[in-house]
Image (cartoon, rainbow, N blue to C red):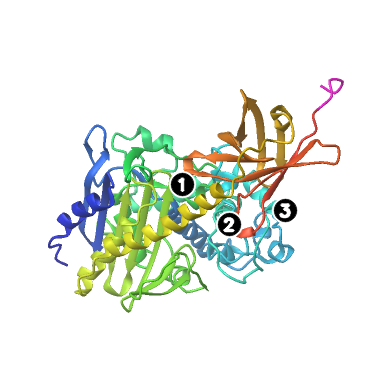
Amino acid sequence: MELGDLRSFIEESLEFWKVPGVAVSIVKDGEVILAEGFGYKDLENKKKMTADTVLPIGSASKSFTAMAAAILIDEEKMTWDTPVNEYIPGFKMYDPVASANANIRDMLCHRTGLPRHDLMWAGGTGLSFTREDLIRRVRYLENNAGFREKAQYQNHMLATVGHAVENVSGESWEDFVKEKIFKPLGMNSSNFHVADSQKAADHGLPYRHDFKNDMAIKPAEFMELGAPGPAGSINSTVNDMTNWIKLMLGKGAFTIGGKEVRVVSEERVTEMLAPQMHIGLLPWEFPEHQFLTCGMGWFLDVYRGHRCFEHGGNVTGFTALVSMMPDQNIGICVLANMNSTFMNHALVDSIYDRVLNAEKTDWNNRYFAEITKLLAQMQEGKDAVEKGRIEGTKPSLDISAYAGVYEHPGYGTLAITQKDDALEADFNGNKLRMTHHHYDQFMPHLDRFESALPSRFTLDVMAGVESISVPFEGALGKDIVFTKKAEESEDKK
């Protein structure tokens, strides 16, 4: 493969998408033909991105969790199709059919009927409860589809697979992945925690766009996943990820130091990359991309008639994409320090076009046009909420009456306090500003996600505050209701 103008194209793409930096690796026919950094890992101090810069791979971690399960299947300690409650005693879901039957395969291909419910953990610090507690709470998260009815992208289920790996292996998911995958592949710079990344001399800083200021680049906060780690907590480098690519293209075998190491059987890799369910992830379609389906820990695509498998990842301030075209024996890893950018997809498609000698396509502008439409639709939704606001109203009660602790068995605790003449909420360790909208409706602000949620307090028959309803999961079509906890009397304190 000739790189041609690829390096200059990557630099131009950084400027086009207003992304500080990106690290890119390409493996073709078992050889690393590119592993370089472009732009800056630290924009303020003009520190260059490198191939050894540690960056989150986000949800691309899911493929490692699938691989961990595959290794245990090879060891005859687990199967794809055994109900998970055999590996996690007491495991339950809201849907009793899913509780009894959901297995590793169902969870890895997102077909349990459970929508995302991500704000249950992402709305907090990610560290406010244990992995065991996260999975215990799943039984209180409502499904919006029947079991195996359709694919819906889901993080709790990947955390559940990771916990099943822990119970079966007797090791933490992190230790198992490190020993069984990282070490054989020589992925010595990879880790599972933000704190470990920050200790590395070469690590990237997170950034996001200011959409109110012409997409200006501004710093973002690091995001520690904590409990849902198997769904997205791995941090790595593009140099390390070249070995992961070689393993997948090698169908479970990897050559290091002139010696072949088999991490998992070819049969297991074939099973992971077999289509399980159709899924539609994006609100647009390109004719060059067809037949998007779920494998196990991977999404399967056909690009210009050629099979692909890939997985992206987004955590606050970073975007990742790992993609492979097995018939062309090529794999690509793109890690950027920008929140939710589609530059990674534009780069991967442009690289594949070079491999296939396809007609030149302006993927940057095509993706950007679709993103612009999506952002406009999102803004219309926000404007509609503001337009519907009724001016001159006030809450039914004194502001102090709304303070208290509100609970949901799945989502946890929403502690609301009075701050001057306003309210502030603490949601699983995350401070949320609350502004009055109208009547008994307030807007908790999730600043990390640059959004506000129109939430309403409900009064009981005695005109006391009974609950607060928050639209934490739009796919349900109804709010998550937090019930106010009764205050303890002085006698019981």
Give the extent of the magenta segment: 488-493
Which mark is on residue 233? 1
270 left or right, relative to 137 = left
What SS does tag 1 mark?
A: loop
Q: Locate residue 232, reporting x and y percent.
A: 47, 50
Q: Residue at x 41, y 54 (%)?
A: 313
Q: Earlier in the sequence, mark 3 or mark 1?
A: 3
Disc 1: CA contacts within 10 A as few (<14), some (14-19) or many (>=20): many
Q: Looking at the picture, does residue 402 appear above or below residue 165?
A: above
The amino acid type found where label 2 is placed reads Met
Q: Nearer the viewer, residue 257 or 488?
A: 488
The amino acid type found where label 3 is placed reads Gly
C-alpha separation, residue under disc 2 versus residue under disc 1: 14 Å
Which mark is on residue 474? none
- Can residue 24 be seen in this snapshot? yes
Q: Which residue is mark 3?
A: 90
Q: Which residue is mark 2?
A: 157
The amino acid type found where label 1 is placed reads Ser
400 left or right, relative to 285 = right
Closer to us: mark 3 or mark 1?
1
Q: Nearer the viewer, residue 326 or 178?
A: 326
466 left or right, relative to 231 = right
Q: Earlier in the sequence, mark 2 or mark 1?
A: 2
C-alpha separation, residue under disc 2 versus residue under disc 3: 15 Å
> Residue 131: within the magenta?
no
Which image quadrant: the N terminus? bottom left
